[in-house]
Image (tube, helix red, strand yellow):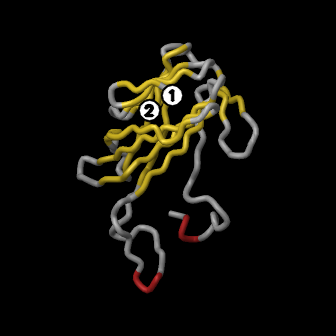
Amino acid sequence: VEPREQGFELQTGAASFVVAAAGATVLQDTSPARRSLVLDARDENDAALECRFTRCVLETTGPLRVTILLEGELRSPTGVRALVIVRLSFFRASPVVRLAVTVRNPRRAEHPGNFWELGDRGSIYFRDISLRLESPNELRTVECWPETPGDCRVLAAPMSIYQDSSGGERWQASTHVN
């Protein structure tokens, strides 16, 4: 791990990466493929939200794994703001990067009568939040682990993984349906 302007350069032995607090780019693969991973988001009117990462810190470091924390925000043209936190874990001798993305609403929600209804005044509605892989070369397949734990899946490109509403034990609750 080498510090660089606003971020870090990492060499795992199988690939090289750059992570920096600059715009919407989450990750750049500098070798061998020169790909970039970018965060895109759209609001309820399908308008693009501006994503800007402003902080990049080395969170953990060890002989087998390094974790970098990226923090930033999503902003709409009307000033609606959400916080974005991305944890990227890199592994020795591996081109695999584990991502954990959290989007958090900093505005306090109101729950009159302790009733947790979706869509109160403090809510933010997202039509879409995506991680887009940009590559100068045509991608034929993508290897990914959409679930942890789970098996590696090889998917034909272009591909997408879609999650609708909330997950967990009560994923079919009536409050999770629009």
Q: Is residue 159 above or below residue 123?
A: above
Q: Is residue 139 above or below residue 42?
A: above
User: What residue is shown at x 42% (from left), y 56% (from top)?
Assistant: 104
Q: Residues within 10 Å of mark 2 (few under 14, many from 20)?
A: some
Q: Quadrant of residue 19?
A: top left
Type of residue at label 1? Leu
Splitting the image into 4 quarters, where does residue 150 fall?
top right
In this image, 66 relative to 71: left or right?
Answer: right
The percent coordinates of residue 133 (x first, y second) are 51, 28
Disc 1 marks which residue? Answer: 133
Please name whichever residue, 57 or 115, is drawn nearer the observer in this view of the structure.
57
Q: Residue furthest front?
A: 63
Percent position (x, y) of residue 149? 73, 46
Q: Amino acid at mark 2?
A: Val
- Would you place residue 126 above or below residue 31 in this image? below
Circle 2 is placed at which residue position? 38
Q: Quadrant of residue 145?
A: top right
